Structures are given as C-alpha cells and as structure tokens.
C-alpha cells in the first residue's frame, strides 16, 4: 500500500419524486435539490424519479459549474427517471430495461409505463490508475401492499436481472457502486439475492460513522409528503434507498461515513422529496493483492436465498400461467360468439329466417362487445405469454446457479 | 509463446428457419441438423430461429452425448429462437432484448413478436487458462425491402445496442465470439458500425482457407427454400450470416478455415435451412503481450461510420416523431367526437331535441368507431413515444462517441 494514491469519493443518492402534475411542490423541490447539490459539492450524484426532461435540463444548467458531466437515461413511455451528475468524465453509458415491470392495465400503479431500468455509467477518475466506477442509478417495481404483494415475483426477476447485469458488466471495473431506491427492506429476499449474488456491500451496515434518520430509514413518517397510513406498521419508517459498493480488482473500498437527510431542507418548510437522501463518503485505495473473494464466505447462505427467491418466482409463474390460459379461453369464447353472429347475419341476409329478424341495435352492440373482448383478451394473452417466458427463464437461471453452488460448495 | 497451450475451436452457426406451421419440412430439417451436428463434433453450435421449444428439446436429447451443455433463450411472445450447444461447460448466461424491434401492427413481418435479443453465454475451456468465451448468438431485424428500408433505423439501433452490449460485457473475457444472422450485407453501415465499435474481426475476411458458396454467401438462389425474386439483384446470393471474433487480453485468435454449406444435406434432397450454415475453425493461443489495439487503427474511418449511422437514426427519429404526433392528433379527434356524441346523447335524454331523434344504430356505430380509433391511436401514440425516446437516446450516445473520437483522434 506504500505511497499509492487514495481517493475520497462523496456519493449522493435521492429518489426525487418529481412527477409532472402529480408530485407536490415539484419545481420548488427541484430548485432546492439543485441549490443543495451546488453547495455540497459531491463527486457523484445519482437521482431517480426525475420524470420530466425539463427538470433534468434545469438541473444540468444549474450544476454545470460543479458537475460538468451528466447523463439522462431515456426509456419507456414516460422515461426511466434516472440521471447522473458527475465531477469526473463519463466515458460510456448503457441502459438495461428489465424484462418484467408490472402490468400495463394496472393504470393506477403506472410502473409499466416507466420502463424501469438500470443505467450503467462508466467513470474514470484520474489520481487512481484506471479506476473505473460503475454507478448504477436505478429503481425496482414499487411495493403497494406488503401483506399481499402481487408484484413480488416481478421485483425478484428485476433483482435477479440487476444482479446478473452488474456481474456481467463490472468484471473489468475497479470499483462498483450501486445507488437507488430498491423498493425492498434490508431483510427482504430480493436484497439478500442482489447482495449475495453480486458481493455488493451495504454502505449503511459498513459505515464507520452514521448520521441521520434512525436505522438509516429513508421513508419516514416525519416527512410531510409520505403516506402515514402505509407506514403505520413501521413507526420509525423503512429503509428502501441504498448505496451499495464493492471493489473488484486491486482496490479496496471502505465506507467512512453515511448520512441521510432528516426532514425539511435548510431554511425552508419543505423536504427535498418524499424519500430521504442517502450520502456516503467512500475511501478507495489501491492494495497489493487482488480482492474479490467476497462471494465464497456467503455461499451456503446464498443457496438458501436463491432457493427462496426461486420459490417466489415459481408462485408468480403459476399465477401468470393461469392468467395466460384464462385470457386465452376468453379470447376463444369471444371469437366463437363473433362466428355465431356472423353465421346468423349471413343467414338473415340469405333470407333463411326472415320471419324473425334480429333487433339490429342489440346485434351490433353484441358484435362490438365481442370484438372488444377479443382484442383485449388477445392482448392480455400475449402479455402473459411473455410474462410466463421471462419467469420461466429466471427460474431456470436460478436453478443453474443452485446446481453450480451445490457442485462447488 | 513458448509451450503455451493452444486450442483449435470449431464453431457452427446456422439460422435454422424453424417456424412452427410455416417453415417447410421443418421437422425433417431439424432431424438432419441434429444428425449432422452429432457426426461433425463441433465445439460450439450457435442456432437461430429455433422458435419451437420442442425442437430445442429434441435437439438437446439427440446431442446430449457430444454437446452435454446447452441453453435456450426465452423472450418475447414467440421466443428469441436462440440456442447454444457446447462441448464445454456453460458458466453463465445473460439475455439483452433490443429496445426497438419493428412495429407490433406490422403483423405480416412479425419481428416485433419475437423479442429479438442477443444472448450471452460464458464458457470456460480447460487447457487454456481462464479463457472465457462469449458467443452471442443473435439476430437483427429483417430487411424486407432493400431500396426503401423502413426498418433501417431500428436495425442500426440494434447494431449499436449489440456493439455496446458486447463492449460492456466482454471486458474481462479472453476471447469474444459473435455468430448469427445479422440481416446486413458486409458493406452495410450497421456491420461497419458493429465491427468498428467493437473491434470484432470477420472470420470470412480473415480465414486462411475458405470453402463454400462463392463470396461466402449464406442466402443463395440455389437453395430451394429461398425467395428467388428477392435475390434477383444478387445472382451469387448475399452474405448476411457471420462469425465474428476477437481476442481481448493475453490471447491471440486466428481463423484457420471457414466453410459454408452448399445446398442439400448429404444423401437427401433437402437443405438444412433457407440459409447456409457458417463453420469456422479458430486457432486460439496465449501470447506474451496484451492485445486490444484493434480500435485505434480504424478510428478515423469509425467516425465516418458513426456519423452515417447517426444520420440514418436521425431520419428514423423524425419519422417516429411525425407518427407520434399524428397518432396523438387522431386520438384527440376521436375523443372530441366522443364528447360531442355524449353531449348530443345527454341533450336527447333531457328532451332538448326530442323532435329530431338520432337513428340509434348509426349513433352507436359511430360511438364504437370513435372508441376504437381512440384506443388504437392512443396505443400507437404510446408506442411511438417509446420509439422516439430510444432513437433519441441512441443518437445522443453516438454523438457522445463522435465527440470522444474527435477529442482523442
């Protein structure tokens, strides 16, 4: 370690809750976030839920001086909401859109329309030789009801895809950073899976010094924008925003300090967002020997986690298969009805039953209803077919990993 | 190079054209392909357009003895059609689905339903130290009309995403292999982009010894399954199936031999597919110094290629923006018509114009028509909004690369 350059990297992560027309006091909060970022002078800023490109452009203009490099990830109908600001040059970017992300017909949740993704940014920091950083700012599908969580299989598929994406894209990096709203509690199987399968460490658990909301919570009842009823079972709040990290090659990373914001922005009565921000100070240093043995110690536990995740994915798979076949049956019935109507209409035209003509209006209404149901059911059937394929694929991949873990314990 | 182990790797690539109910003599050809693969004993087999999972399972059972490891990539409604058979253990897999892939309403082309993707397989070969191979078996959007190619921007986005995916996932690999039907001629901008931006080399151009169809063509008029009228401007046929490769770290790869099939399978009157298969023998050897300087020599040309690709993507972007706004306008008009009808119906109910009652049937028909147009136009608008976002994102990324190329010539 003699004389090797060391780096202190300050990372900021926040789910900004900046949905146009829906989020309260959005523009004011974006202003406040920009002001604070300009004052604080972080090295790397990972923002989520910046759904409006104009908000991003405003931030970009404001932060040009202290964060000259930035990237906005576009995806889905509304956008991914992800953006990164950096003091160091961004060399390259890549977006990976999760294969499953809720249902298009669940309009009230809207996750499907966001095209939720993980964004990869490669940053080279002079001072440390070839230290490529891969901060993935991202967000997984929201949890709307913890007791009866219909989206759990989708979130697990996303956690798995995220882990696989990190593993495959970070092999040549020196340091990997992942910051974002994972919509999962620290003890949830999805987080265990992500951490176990990538070897990423939780900055909150590893920090030498911590300051902020109790238990590192990032969704707290004190925040005036949070839904109090949702947090009733958790009087302290919940921790769903994370900064995770690992060193891969000749580097060593330690989390020196972790902070969260606690309530309103300084000098105002408004918090930055409905989430609290997470801020980590990481100490990165070159070391003699190559690291990377993080996985081995956790492997016996990892097998249990993968097994549990696979079971949940299996539950989702059976539900999707059921929806797939019931929508298929519905489409067939509608088609049958249409065929019957077509036969009746042809019969009427040929004068076979001219004595008892159909009431034209009801006949037309019934035909339109049948066409509507046919189109809807076919759409649903196609959608659930894709869902089944992706769940099967994840289940299979997990099984492959389990087999490998069992063969090489 | 003294005493370092060398490896001779035999790779097979074929677009199998195995679409259930549509492809001629499908089962017979799958049988023939299986028999030939069992006899020939390749190391790595990359197959495309195996759309039926049953065909894959049949092949898997048949090839269990000589290719004990295999993987089938699931995606989209129909599947990705990609599968890999290998003599060496498959350690890990990853599927990346292209963000753009044609239009769901172009039912006659059907590309959108296939969920076209690139599949990554990591293979470790004993004998050569940590030689990870990344064969990506994949296929890009088909070209239906070369003169007026409406899918060119989508294919370029796919070529770009493929190149980015390869760059990001192959950093730690020793050897990268890409085999598949790229639906592009060797001189097309998409191929130049892919090769220039990844540094992959074309086995046909590099092979010491070649045997097969003239000019390495893989879609030839002699094949009884090809559409002769499409190949009229190309009397020899076209070359759209490739095996590309590069060595990244301490390895060196040479293509010793490249072959294509030429017509019918031995002892029968039926070819294996409408495409010819490509077979490469690669010689992989450890070398003293690290390679990887493939990009630098081609960079001035690369800037031209990226500029050309970006122009084409820009053309696609403007078309998508136009479709986006016209579908939006159409949706608005349909909504307006519905509102007018609702007002008229309310007026009629309130007895305001009881003297001139609407003909109920036409009224209902008109309402259903308006609802139909509203739904369709909204769907189209959402789809084209996503398309615009992805085209913008690719254009931006290409611009970033151009800037980097200009700054560091």
Image (tube, coloured by chain):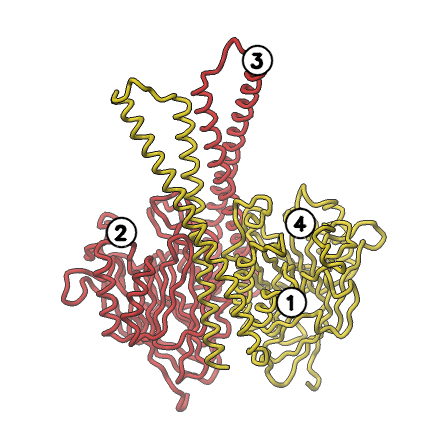
Chain colours: A red, B yellow
For marks 3 and 2, give the CA distance.
58 Å
Residue at the image point whose x is 65% and y is 55% from the top: B48
Q: Residues within 10 Å of mark 2 (few under 14, many from 20)?
A: few
Q: What element carries label 4?
A: helix
Left or right placement of residue A14 versus residue A155 in this view: left
Image location of residue A285, percent across then percent down: 39, 82
Q: B373 or A313, which lies in front? A: B373
Q: Mark 4 lies on which chain?
A: B
For marks 3 and 1, give the CA distance.
64 Å
| Residue that carries the numbered disc 1 in the rendered image | B187
The circle on residue A21 is 2
Image location of residue A263, percent across then percent down: 19, 62
The reply to whether label 1 and label 2 mark residues of one chain is no
The reply to whether label 1 and label 4 mark residues of one chain is yes
Tell me if I can see residue A304 in this picture: no
Left or right placement of residue A142 versus residue B161 in this view: left
Seen as rendered, the residue at the extreme top is A355
For marks 1 and 2, give the CA distance.
49 Å
Mark 1 vs 2: CB contact within 8 A? no
* Image quadrant where one finds the N terminus of chain B: bottom right
The circle on residue A351 is 3
Left or right placement of residue B82 versus residue B406 in this view: right
Q: Is mark 3 on a helix, strand or loop?
A: loop
Q: Which of marks 3 and 2 is in front?
A: 3
């Amino acid at each position: 370690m003699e004389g090797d350059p060391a780096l202190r990297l300050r990372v900021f992560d926040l789910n900004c809750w900046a949905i146009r027309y829906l989020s309260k006091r959005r523009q004011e909060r974006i202003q406040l976030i920009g002001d604070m970022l300009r004052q604080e002078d972080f090295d790397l800023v990972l923002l989520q839920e910046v759904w409006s490109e104009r908000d991003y452009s405003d931030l970009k203009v404001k932060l040009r001086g202290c964060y000259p490099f930035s990237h906005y990830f576009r995806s889905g109908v509304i956008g991914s909401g992800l953006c990164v600001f950096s003091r160091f040059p961004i060399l390259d970017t890549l977006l990976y859109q999760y294969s499953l992300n809720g249902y298009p017909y669940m309009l009230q949740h809207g996750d499907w329309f966001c095209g939720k993704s993980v964004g990869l940014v490669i940053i080279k920091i002079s001072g440390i030789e070839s230290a490529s950083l891969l901060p993935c700012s991202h967000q997984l599908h929201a949890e709307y009801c913890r007791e009866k969580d219909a989206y759990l299989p989708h979130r697990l598929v996303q956690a798995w895809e995220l882990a696989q994406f990190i593993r495959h894209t970070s092999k040549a990096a020196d340091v990997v950073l992942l910051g974002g709203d994972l919509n999962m509690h620290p003890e949830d199987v999805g987080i265990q899976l992500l951490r176990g399968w990538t070897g990423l460490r939780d900055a909150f658990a590893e920090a030498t010094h911590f300051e902020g909301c109790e238990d590192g919570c990032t969704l707290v009842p004190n925040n005036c924008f949070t839904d109090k009823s949702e947090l009733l079972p958790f009087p302290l709040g919940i921790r769903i925003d994370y900064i995770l990290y690992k060193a891969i090659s000749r580097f060593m990373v330690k989390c020196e300090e972790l902070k969260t914001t606690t309530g309103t922005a300084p000098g105002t009565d408004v918090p930055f967002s409905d989430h609290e921000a997470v801020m980590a100070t990481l100490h990165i240093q070159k070391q003699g020997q190559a690291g990377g043995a993080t996985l081995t110690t956790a492997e016996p536990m990892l097998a249990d986690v993968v097994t549990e995740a696979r079971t949940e994915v299996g539950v989702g798979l059976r539900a999707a298969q059921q929806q797939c076949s019931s929508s298929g049956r519905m489409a067939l019935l509608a088609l049958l009805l249409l065929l019957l109507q077509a036969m009746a209409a042809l019969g009427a035209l040929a004068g076979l039953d001219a004595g008892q003509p159909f009431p034209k209006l009801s006949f037309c209404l019934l035909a339109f209803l049948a066409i509507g149901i046919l189109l809807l059911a076919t759409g649903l059937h196609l959608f659930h077919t894709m869902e089944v394929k992706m769940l099967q694929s994840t289940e299979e991949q997990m099984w492959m990993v389990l087999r490998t873990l069992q063969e090489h314990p």
